[in-house]
């Protein structure tokens, strides 16, 4: 198996010192040595050509000459030497890495700890408290295997069988899901996935998954499932139902006070006088009925006829009492 293909960012960061050390090298030879096509290398050079120092005036930008099939570096914008982190930068990076390690399932814990160790080895003597933090990280337990299974299945786009605890119902269910993405909120990691049992997009909190098994089949959520942008705040229980609602322009303030997720752009809609559609996860039909009644028709449900009928009946009964 050959070496892994470096990311474009890594390649771009290495290119300026590479070409500075090989002045006048041909694009053909450079592409072969860098492991990319000539077309990709040309695109990379065109991008580097408009990068540089803050201010971004012509004399601040990286200067490259590559129009005749050969590459020459004129101005490097400081990219001719290895990156060195300041004490503040290193401390900030270490704090961020440790936060990732402590949040279940976000990253490969072993890889994150290796990165922490390398940074601490390089700057540990100059960063207060680093040694103690390193000892704590090294002694902590490894990642939960269930979290690793979920994260890897999401990365590889494989279906999962979950045994999941629903806090709202105080019950455990078995279900097959098609992973879409991972989300992080308030120090908790969630799997956003298409739940085949509920036939909808649901969020599964990592620490409520009793077990996870990768299935020998690809993840196949519906084409529009990835655009749902399900809210972590309102979907702690994957068994809760959801409804599409419509909000009049003069009541858009409800978006700031209730757990609603707009399903279309709010600020840049073509006509500001048109209502906005949003998705609401709710606990019971009775709660949703009371919620809608409180807005006197300015907030309406679109895809739940039974709820619409209940709202109309309750509103009619209320009006009847004033006759």
Image: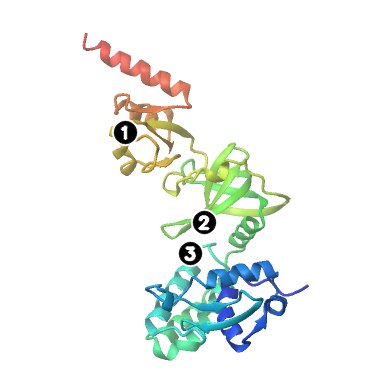
Task: Residue 273: give x, y in percent of width and height.
Answer: 33, 31
Q: Which mark is residue 103?
A: 3
Mark 3 packing: few (<14 Cα in 10 Å), some, or many (20+)? some
The front one of 175 and 122 is: 122
Between 126 and 62, the one nearer to me in the picture? 62
Q: How far apart, in angstroms, are the residues tagged by discs 1 and 2?
A: 39 Å
- The residue located at (45%, 32%) in the rendering is 244
SS category of the residue bearing label 3: loop
Of the two numbered discs 3 and 1 on the same chain, state the one appearing first in sequence: 3
Q: Is residue 115 visible?
A: yes
Check the picture and name the quadrant holding the N terminus. Answer: bottom right
Query: x, y percentage for residue 122?
Result: 49, 88
Few, some or many residues within 10 Å of mark 1 (<14, 14–19, 20+)? some
Residue 135's x, y, as percent?
A: 48, 83
Identify the residue at horizontal 37%, vertical 86% (top origin): 128
Residue occupying image coordinates x 48% and y 44%:
237
Q: Nearer the viewer, mark 2 or mark 3?
A: 3
Residue identified by numbered label 1 = 249
Residue 306 badge: none
Rendered location of residue 265, percent (x, y): 42, 42
When the figure is inspected, residue 313 is found, relative to residue 250, above or below; the finding is above
Give the label, 3 or 1, closer to the camera. 1
Q: Are marks 3 and 1 in contact (CB under 8 Å)?
A: no
The CA distance from mark 3 to mark 1 is 39 Å
Local secondary structure at mark 1: helix
Task: Examine the image and state in which quarter residue 6 appears.
Answer: bottom right
Residue at left 39%, top 39%? 269
- The disc, 1 or 2, on the residue closer to the chain's N-terminal end is 2
**First in sequence: mark 2 or mark 3?**
3
> Looking at this rendering, what residue extends furthest in the right direction?
1
Q: In the image, which is nearer the foreground, mark 1 or mark 2?
A: 1
Query: Residue beneath label 2, please?
Result: 207
């Amino acid at each position: 198996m050959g070496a892994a293909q470096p990311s474009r960012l890594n390649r771009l960061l290495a290119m300026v010192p590479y070409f500075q050390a090989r002045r006048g090298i041909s694009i053909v030879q450079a592409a072969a040595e860098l492991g990319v096509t000539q077309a990709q290398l040309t695109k990379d050079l065109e991008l580097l050509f408009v990068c540089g120092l803050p201010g971004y005036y012509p004399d601040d930008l990286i200067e490259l000459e590559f129009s005749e099939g050969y590459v020459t570096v004129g101005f490097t914008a400081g990219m001719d030497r290895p990156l060195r982190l300041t004490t503040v930068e290193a401390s900030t990076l270490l704090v961020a890495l440790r936060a990732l390690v402590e949040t279940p399932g976000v990253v490969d814990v072993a890889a994150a700890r290796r990165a922490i160790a390398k940074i601490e080895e390089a700057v540990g003597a100059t960063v207060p408290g680093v040694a103690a933090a390193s000892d704590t990280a090294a002694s902590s337990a490894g990642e939960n295997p269930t979290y690793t299974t979920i994260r890897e299945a999401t990365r590889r786009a494989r279906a999962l069988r979950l045994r999941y605890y629903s806090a709202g119902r105080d019950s455990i269910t078995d279900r097959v899901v098609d992973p879409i993405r991972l989300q992080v909120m308030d120090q908790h990691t969630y799997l956003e996935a298409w739940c085949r049992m509920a036939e909808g997009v649901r969020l599964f909190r990592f620490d409520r998954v009793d077990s996870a098994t990768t299935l020998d089949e690809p993840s196949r959520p519906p084409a529009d499932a990835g655009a749902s942008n399900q809210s972590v705040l309102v979907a702690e229980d994957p068994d809760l139902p959801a409804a599409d609602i419509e909000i009049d322009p003069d009541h858009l303030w409800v978006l700031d006070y209730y757990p609603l997720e707009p399903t279309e752009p709010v600020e840049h809609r073509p006509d500001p006088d048109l209502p906005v559609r949003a998705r609401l996860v709710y606990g019971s039909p009775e709660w949703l009925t009371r919620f809608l009644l409180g807005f006197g028709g300015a907030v309406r449900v679109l895809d739940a006829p039974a709820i619409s009928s209940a709202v109309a009946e309750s509103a009619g009964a209320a009006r009847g009492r004033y006759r």
